[in-house]
Image (cartoon, rainbow, N blue to C red):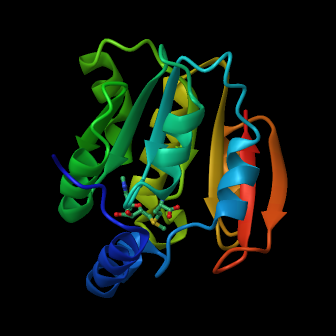
C-alpha cells in the first residue's frame, strides 16, 4: 500500500520546486493552517457541488477541501508543475478529486470534458502578479464565465496588486487579511 508522504517531505518537495520555478510558485513555503481556515471559512459546503482549485502545489489546501466537502461534491484542481501533479495523484487517491495537469485558463474546457456544469467556488493561489498580462486576463475571464450563478472566486495573494484586475472582472470584492502566514496574505472574495 502507498504511504501518505509526511509534512516534511511535502515541504521539501515544495521548496525544491520553488528554487527551480520561483515565479510560477510565488512562495517558498505552503500556506499556513490559519490562512486555510480563513479562506475555507467562506465556503458554504452545503451549496458547493463543484469546487475548482488553481495551483494546489503539494495539496496543502486540497486536503482540507476534501475533508470538508460532501461525498457528492467534485473537486477539480489545475496544476502546471509536473512534479506536483504526480505527487497529488499519488497522495490523494480520492474518487471525488480530478487532477488536471494544465493551466487555469483551461477551466471551462476541462469542466466540460468532465461533464461538470460550472463551478460553485474557484479557490486560487496562483501568483497573478508575476504572470504575463494576457494570461492573467484570460484566467480571470475564463474563471468568471465558469462560475455558476451565486458562485464565488476566493483568491489569496501576498500583495493587493491584483485588486485592480479583479475589479474589472467581478462586481463585488470583499477583502480580508491573514497575518499568520509566511508571507502575510491578502484574501479577496469575488462575486
Ligand atoms: C504559491 S503556490 C500555492 C500552493 C498551495 N496552494 C498553497 O497554498 O500552499 C502556487 C502554485 O500555483 C501553480 N501555478 C502557477 N501558475 C499556474 C497556472 N497558470 N495554472 C495552474 N497552476 C499554476 C504553481 O505551480 C504552484 O504550485
Q: Residue at x 31, y 17 (%)?
A: 112
Identify whether 10 is placed above or below 47.
below
Taking depth in this image into account, of 163 and 112 the one nearest to the observer is 112
185, 170: nearer the viewer: 185
- Residue 58 visible in the picture: yes
What residue occupies the far bottom of the structure in this picture? 19
- Quadrant (top left/top right/bottom left/bottom right) for the C terminus: top right
Give me the residue at 48% from left, 58% from top: 60
Q: How many marks?
A: 0
Placement of 160 over or under 109, stated as above or below? below
Q: Is residue 165 rendered to the left or right of residue 114? A: right
Query: Horizontally, is 48 left or right of 110 in the view?
Result: right
Residue 102 in sight? no
Q: Residue furthest front?
A: 1
Query: Residue, x 42% and y 67% (percent of image)?
Result: 131
Above or below — where is 16 with respect to 50? below
Look at 68% across and 43% down and name the residue there.
40
Place of residue 13 in the rendered image (x, y in percent of width and height, measured from the top left): 30, 75
Q: Quadrant of ligand 1?
A: bottom left
| Residue 110 vertical placement versus 149 (above, below) | below
Q: Position of residue 53 (x, y in %)?
A: 47, 43
Q: Nearer the viewer, residue 90 or 50?
A: 90
Q: Quadrant of residue 92?
A: top left
Percent across and percent down for residue 3 are 24, 55
Res. 86 image quadrant: bottom left
Amino acid at each position: 500500500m502507498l504511504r501518505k508522504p509526511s509534512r516534511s517531505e511535502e515541504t521539501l518537495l515544495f521548496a525544491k520546486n520553488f528554487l527551480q520555478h520561483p515565479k510560477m510558485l510565488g512562495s517558498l513555503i505552503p500556506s499556513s493552517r490559519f490562512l486555510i481556515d480563513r479562506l475555507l471559512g467562506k465556503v458554504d459546503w452545503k451549496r458547493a457541488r463543484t469546487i475548482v482549485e488553481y495551483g494546489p502545489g503539494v495539496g496543502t489546501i486540497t486536503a482540507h477541501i476534501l475533508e470538508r466537502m460532501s461525498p457528492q461534491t467534485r473537486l477539480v484542481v489545475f496544476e502546471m508543475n509536473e512534479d506536483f501533479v504526480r505527487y497529488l495523484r499519488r497522495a490523494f487517491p480520492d474518487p471525488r478529486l480530478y487532477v488536471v495537469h494544465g493551466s487555469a485558463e483551461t477551466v471551462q474546457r476541462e469542466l466540460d470534458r468532465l461533464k461538470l456544469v460550472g463551478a460553485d467556488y474557484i479557490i486560487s493561489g496562483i501568483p497573478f502578479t508575476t504572470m504575463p498580462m494576457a494570461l492573467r486576463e484570460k484566467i480571470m475571464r475564463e474563471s468568471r464565465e465558469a462560475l455558476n450563478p451565486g458562485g464565488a472566486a476566493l483568491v489569496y495573494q501576498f500583495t493587493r496588486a491584483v485588486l485592480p484586475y479583479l475589479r474589472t472582472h467581478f462586481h463585488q470584492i470583499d477583502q480580508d487579511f491573514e497575518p499568520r502566514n509566511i508571507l502575510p496574505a491578502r484574501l479577496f472574495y469575488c462575486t
